[in-house]
Amino acid sequence: MESNARTRTVPRVTFFGIDVDVVVGSENSTPQAREAQTLIVTDEALARPAWADAARALELVPSFAEPCAEATHAGEALSEPRSRARAVVEGRATDVFRVRALPKKNLGLEEATRKAVGAAVADWKTQGVKAARLILATGNSRSNGTPGSADSLLKATLESLAFALYRFEYTFGNAPIKRHERALSKVTVEVRWEEPRTDASGVSLAFGKGETLDAWVRQEASIALAWQFARWLGDRPANTLSPAALVEEVAARVTPLGVSARILDEKSLEAQGFGGILAVGKGSANPPRLGIYEYAPVGFENAAPIVLVGKGVTFDTGGYSIKPKQHHNDMKYDMCGAAGVAAALEAIARAKLPVRVVALLACAENMVSRDAQRPGDVYRAWNGKTVDVYNTDAEGRLLLGDALAFSGTFAPSVVVDMATLTGGTLAIAGNLAAIACASHESLVREIREAGASVGEKYLHLEILPEVIADMKGLVSDYTNMNAKWSTSAMTMHAAAFLGEFVPEGVDWLHLDIAGMAYAARDNGYAGGPGANAYGARSLFHFVANRALRAH
């Protein structure tokens, strides 16, 4: 890097009360003494003379081998060597994280960077740091979005900061529902690469796809916050997030971005024949809703859309087939599929992707009352098929069945549904991966490719053709549970049921995120017991990849 390069401060963005500044750094810029300092360095940067001190320090650490994986705090026991060393950079002791891609573990350079950033934030919190400087040394002057380029790694850094700094904030009864106290108030991200493109005054010219660095950072920060919107919805107590509140919160969030919103209340649902959604919600004082949101940029108004369907059960008692008391409080998270779809839609609109997208959020509260559906009740779905309710705790498929059938009115190119649908996913993949079922294996490959870029994994579960025969009813077309073998193969049976409601000839992908949507395995930057937005980023990249291939 040229030693006379100047520093350009970008207008700050704020992540949950913490100011984040981004600067294009120079070798002679020196952080203030009160700032904690962390260096995240790629192998390409380590080959540069400017990072010789860091390279020598790293060579003195025998266990230094791979990117930070499971670490959240300094000194914690790790399942694999932590890529961390102490080095002297610019005369100060510095935490150093070396990041590298590990293809055998499906760990790309961007995800390794997210993990390192997450570990750095955890250290700052543990140490009570008030201001921190994160130096991102790429050794790469490219700004074209390719893996390992400066903008790609900065984007990963901003995304990880938003995840790691997230805190649930909600005002309830004119006061914060939770009080937060923490020392950290400012983070400066300093991006360094060899010979950055600047004008005569040293100001960065462009970043990403030609935007100014200022605009690019604000754009990427807004997308990073979209994922936190999904977490914020998921963490909301059910007494503050009814089905109506959920669809209205989403509408308020996306309509300023040019997304149209239409909400069907219980009267409209009844008039239009949404028997499944009504059946689930009839026992609650909070009636069900169907949120319909459409993103159609200029020139794509008549294109065949990608339809995203999300399950939004704001609380699930199980109905008369009541759930066991263990973890009953977690049933507020049964709307994480809808939250993830909403976040993906927001990110798509913020990124201005050249594609038409329709999001359908089927929302209800599954309660016990004199009006609630009973085991043995039969209802008629939107597409005219009848269903015998064998188990009122198999409610998600009733909601999704209606929404999937209704998706056909948009003549979609593909339909993707995402839901916390079955506890059976834990028996199949634990908290290691979500389950993917599809009408074509190519769709599973697409979601796996999309998920790999953000560290989200999907295990393919084939729907065996004979399974649907187990769900034929005696007095109806279908039952909502396996009528012959009780709860066995529940994840496959649920997917098979949904497949009967997908419009004929339409490509369909089903994502069951029940084991991954909350209190899941820590990925290094979005850990914790609450909602984690699992699947939202995969959906975004699934749509983005399709848009890229089409244009």
Image (cartoon, rainbow, N blue to C red):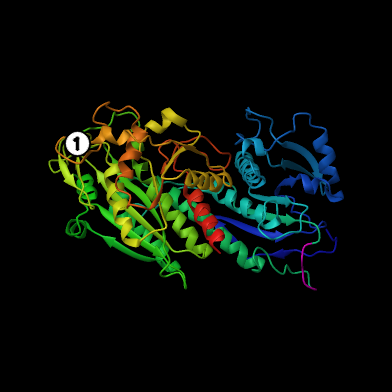
| Residue 221 x/y as whole percent | 57, 58
Going by the numbered disc 1, the residue's amino acid type is Gly
Front residue of 403/268: it is 403
What type of secondary structure mainly makes up the magenta span? loop
Q: Residue at x 64, y 65 (%)?
A: 209
Residue 253 in the magenta stretch? The answer is no
Q: Is residue 197 magenta?
A: yes
Residue 127 pos. (x, y %): 64, 40
Give the residue pinned by disc 1.
473
User: Can you tell which quarter of the image residue 357 is in?
Assistant: bottom left
Q: Report the quarter where the C terminus lies.
A: bottom right
The answer to which of 68 and 142 lies nearer the viewer is 142
Region of the chain picked out in magenta, as a range:
196-200
x 81%, y 64%: residue: 5
For this view, does 524 lie left or right of residue 97? left
Q: Secondary structure at mark 1?
A: loop
Position of 515 relative to 246 (above/below): above
Q: Is residue 76 above or below residue 340?
A: above
Location of residue 42 in the rendering, given as x and y in whole percent from the top left corner: 74, 46
Tell me the quarter of the image containing the N terminus. bottom right
| Whether residue 169 is visible | no
Between 168 and 128, the one lying in front of the other is: 168
How many dots with numbers? 1
Q: Residue at x 42, y 30 (%)?
A: 426
Observer-nearest of 514 and 298: 298
Query: How packed is label 1: few (under 14 Cα within 10 Å), some, or many (20 or more)?
Result: many
